[in-house]
Amino acid sequence: MLLQKAPCPHDPYHPPPPSSPTTFRFKSSNIVTFLRHNHNNNQPHLSTSFHNHKPTTTTATEKLSKSSGTSNSCISSSSSGSFSLIRTKMVAMVAVDPYVLWTFFASLLGFVALSVLRRRNYVNGMAKDRSKVQKNKNSTNKSLVSEQCVKSSDEGEFRPVYGSGTDVIIVGAGVAGAALAHTLAKEGRRVHVIERDLTEPDRIVGELLQPGGYLKLIELGLEDCVEEIDAQRVLGYALFKDGKNTKLTYPLEQFHSDVAGRSFHNGRFIQRMREKASKLTNVQLEQGTVTSLLEENGTIKGVQYKTKDGQELKAYAPLTIVCDGCFSNLRRSLCKPQVEVPSCFVGLILENCELPFANHGHVILGDPSPILFYPISSTEVRCLVDVPGQKLPPIANGEMANYLKTVVAPQVPPELHDAFISAVDKGNIRTMPNRSMPANPQPTPGALLMGDAFNMRHPLTGGGMTVALSDIVVLRDLLKPLRNLHDPASLCKYLESFYTLRKPVASTINTLAGALYKVFSASPDEARKEMRQACFDYLSLGGTCSTGPVALLSGLNPHPLSLVVHFFGVAVYGVGRLLLPFPSPKRIWIGARLILSASGIIFPIIKAEGVRQMFFPATIPAYHRAPPVE
C-alpha cells in the first residue's frame, strides 16, 4: 500500500517533490494502531504516531520531524482536510484487506472441498443403484405399470428398488377395489391390483347405485363409468302392498339435473372401472389369487398369490388393502367377522316389459318377504325374490320354479305377471346369499379392510356401493397429506380415524337396511303386522314423512339421528292408528308391543354399529387425529 506525501499549501518554503516521491509503507496492523492512537490522544502529528514502529517507516518519520514549525503546523492544520482523506482511504483498506480476502479464499476452498465430497457420494450412490437394478434384471414377471415400478426377483418376490416400488397393494378389483385403485393412482400412488378373475363378472346384486353413491362417483371422477353400459336413471321407489301402491321420489331438487340413481349390469360397470384404472401408468392390474398375507412381527408386508398360470409369487408394499368381497378368505386376519345370512335372493331377468312406474325401483311387501323389480338396461328388468333363511328349494328338480309360480307370482303386479312367468320358464334362475356383517375392525399395521370384505348390510336398499364409494373418499382424504407410507405403526394409528369418519354414511345405510328388511318381512306377530302396515301408511303420507326416509335410504342424508326419529315416528304413528278413534285394552297392548318390537329391531343394529361412533363421533380420540409427522 502506498501513501504519497502531500505538499502543504501554507508552507512558504516547500522543496519541490523529488523525482521519486517519498512513500510510506504501512502494514495493516500499523494503520489500525495509528488510527486508534490518534483517536485516543488527539495527536494530529504523523511523526509521533509512528515513532515506535519498524525502521521501514523511520526514514520518512525523521524527514518529517526535521521540517520547520510551519511544516508541522501545516500537517496539524491539514488533518481536517488532506489527512481526513488519507484516513478514509486507510479505513477502506483496513475493511477490505485482512478479513474479506482471507474469508473469500477460505470460502472458496470450502466450496471446492464440499463439491468434491458431494461428487464422490453421488458416484457411490449411483453405483449402488446400478448394482441393485442389475440384480433384478432377470425377473420372471415383466408386466410392470411403468419403468420405475416393482422389480421381480428370482424367488418370485416383488421388492421395491431404490427410489421406486409399489405404494399400495389392492386385493380385489370389484367396485371397491377398482375405484380405490383409480383414486389412489390419481393421487400419485403406485398401485398393484391383484384380482382373481378379470373377466366380466356376472352377479345379481350390486346393480343399483343410489343418488348418494352417484355423488361420490362424481367426487372420485368416475361418473363416466355409468356411460356406454345402457345404465338406467332411477328417480325413486314404488311400494306395493295388498293391491295398493305409493310412489316415493328422491329429493333431488337442490342437485344438478344429472344427479339421480343408476341401475345397470354389475359386470359392465366393474369392467368400465377396471378399464379406467388400468389406463393410468402407475396402476398394475394383474390376474391372480391371493392365498395369504405376508406378516412379519405383527406387520403386514404384502401378499402371497398364485398367478393365472399357477406360479407362486409374493408382492410387497407398505400398505395392503383387502377388497375381495363378501366371500373374502382374508378378513379373519384383519377383523372379527360376525356374518349373518338372514335370507337369500333368487334372481331373474324379465325381458321386454314395462314397469308400472318408469325409472323407479319397485318393492312389493310380499309374503313371506319383499320382492324387488328395477331396470338394468333399456330392455331388461331385474327381479329379486327374497327367501328367508339359508335353505332354498332346489333348482335342478324344479322345486324352485314351482315355488316362484305358486307363491311369488300371485303377488307380482299384473303388469309384470306374464313376463315373470316367462322368465321362470326360461330357467335362468340365479341365487345369492344375503350377508350382513357390522364393521368390527382389528387395526393391523400395514393392512386395511374395505368394501364387502369389511362391512355388509342386507341388499334390500341397494346401499352397498354407496358405502364403499364413501369409504374411498374418506380414505383418499386421509392419505392425501402423506407422502411416505413406510411407517406402518404410525400409519395404522392414524388410520384408526377412518373407522370413525366413515360412520355417518355407513351406519345410517346399514341400520336402515337391517331395520327395513325386518319391518317389510311378513310375521304372524300382531305387533309386527301393525308395524309393517304403519310403515307403508307413514311413507304414503308424503311430505317429510316420505322425503325424509327416502333421503336416508338414498344416501343423501347421512344422519343417524334423523333415521332414529323417522323410525320411531313410524312406531308412534302405528300406535296412534291403534288408539284412534277409541282405544281398547287389546289395542293398547298391541301398541305397547309395537313400541317394544320397534326397539328390538333398531337398538341391536345400533349397538353393533357403535352408539358412540354413530351419534357422537367427535368424542372418539381418533376423530381428531392428525397425520403422522414425516
Image (cartoon, rainbow, N blue to C red):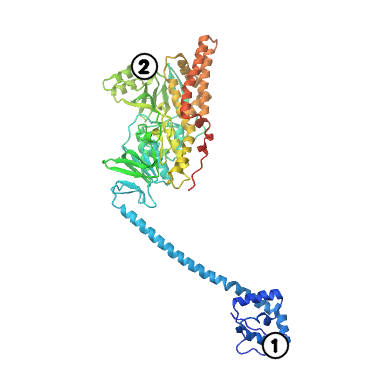
Which numbered marker is on residue 509? none
Q: Position of residue 61 (x, y in %)?
A: 65, 84
**Toward the viewer: 596 or 175?**
596
**Toward the viewer: 343 or 607?**
607
Considering the image in quadrants, where does the N terminus appear? bottom right
Whether residue 557 appears in this view of the structure is: no
Q: Position of residue 150 (x, y in %)?
A: 35, 48
In the image, farthest residue toward the front:
52
| Residue 576 placement: quadrant | top right
Instruction: Tell me the CA gap for discs 2 and 1.
Output: 140 Å
What kind of residue is marked 1? Ser
Which numbered marker is on residue 410? 2
What kind of residue is marked 2? Pro
Task: Establish if 99 lies above or below 575.
Answer: below
Q: Secondary structure at mark 2?
A: helix
Which numbered marker is on residue 67? 1
Q: Is residue 93 left or right of residue 348?
A: right
Q: Secondary structure at mark 1?
A: loop
Instruction: Please name which of the two marks, 2 or 1, marks the residue nearer to the observer.
Output: 1
Q: Earlier in the sequence, mark 2 or mark 1?
A: 1
